Image (cartoon, rainbow, N blue to C red):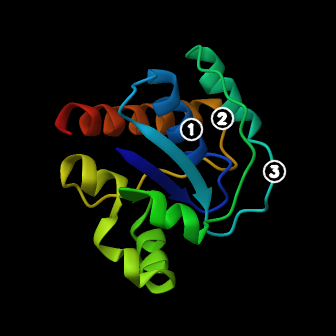
Amino acid sequence: MKLYFICTGNTCRSAMAEAIVKAKQLPHLEVKSAGIFATPHVPMSDNAKAVLAEQAIEESHSASQVQAANMAWADYILTMTAHHLMTLREMYPEHAQKMHTLHEFATGDTRDVQDPFGGNTEVYRQTFNELQQAIEQIIHHE
């Protein structure tokens, strides 16, 4: 299964989601991430790195923008918010059938993933836990 996580800047939520999946080293899962408004090559936020390090998850991330080739590559395109989903459906209507918010795909819930940007490490921990739980749901139901 090929997962493409999407958020705004690709330095917090989608980047952490990608790192969480990669750390699981599951042979049937491939993962990439991007941001709708990402500035290419910007590193992951310091607090996101710190929270991943607390979990012994290595990362070597730099931000990238959503790319048409990766939209085609993905089996599932998972956004962090309903707004991201709406934006992507307008930009790439040909891939709309494989787009979902992360929580919708994982549990059927319609809530957005909390954006930790600008928050302290505790806020990033909360977002990490939220991502981790949703990803576990996906892995156990696929």
Q: Position of residue 60 (x, y in %)?
A: 73, 32
Q: Which amino acid lies under the numbered mark 3 shown in the image of this protein?
A: Val
**Picture quadrant where residue 46 is located:** top right
**Picture quadrant where residue 36 is located:** bottom right
- Residue contact at pointers 1 and 2, CB within 8 angstroms: yes
Q: Which residue is depicted at the point 47% across and 53% down?
A: 4
Judged by depth in the image, the label closer to the viewer, 3 or 2, is: 3
Q: What element carries label 1?
A: helix
Q: Is residue 24 above or below residue 14?
A: above
Q: For residue 109, which numbered disc appears in the image?
A: none
Q: Which amino acid lies under the numbered mark 1 shown in the image of this protein?
A: Met
Q: Where is residue 102 in the image (x, y as percent from the top left)?
A: 36, 53
Q: Is residue 136 above or below residue 7?
A: above
The residues bearing labels 1 and 2 have C-alpha atoms spaced at a distance of: 7 Å
Q: Which residue is depicted at the point 57% across and 71% down?
A: 68
**Residue 44 placement, left or right of 93:** right
Q: Which amino acid lies under the numbered mark 2 shown in the image of this protein?
A: Ala
Q: In this view, does 140 lie above or below 73?
A: above
Q: Is mark 3 on a helix, strand or loop?
A: loop
Label 2 sits on residue = 48
Q: Which residue is depicted at the point 56% across and 33% down?
A: 19
Q: Where is residue 136 in the image (x, y as percent from the top left)?
A: 30, 31
Name the quadrant of the C terminus: top left
Label 3 sits on residue = 42
Label 1 sits on residue = 16
Q: Earlier in the sequence, mark 3 or mark 1?
A: 1
Q: Which of marks 1 and 2 is nearer the N terminus?
A: 1
**Picture quadrant where residue 64 is located:** bottom right
Q: Is mark 2 on a helix, strand or loop?
A: helix
**Residue 137 placement, left or right of 2:** left
The residues bearing labels 3 and 1 have C-alpha atoms spaced at a distance of: 14 Å
Q: Earlier in the sequence, mark 3 or mark 2?
A: 3
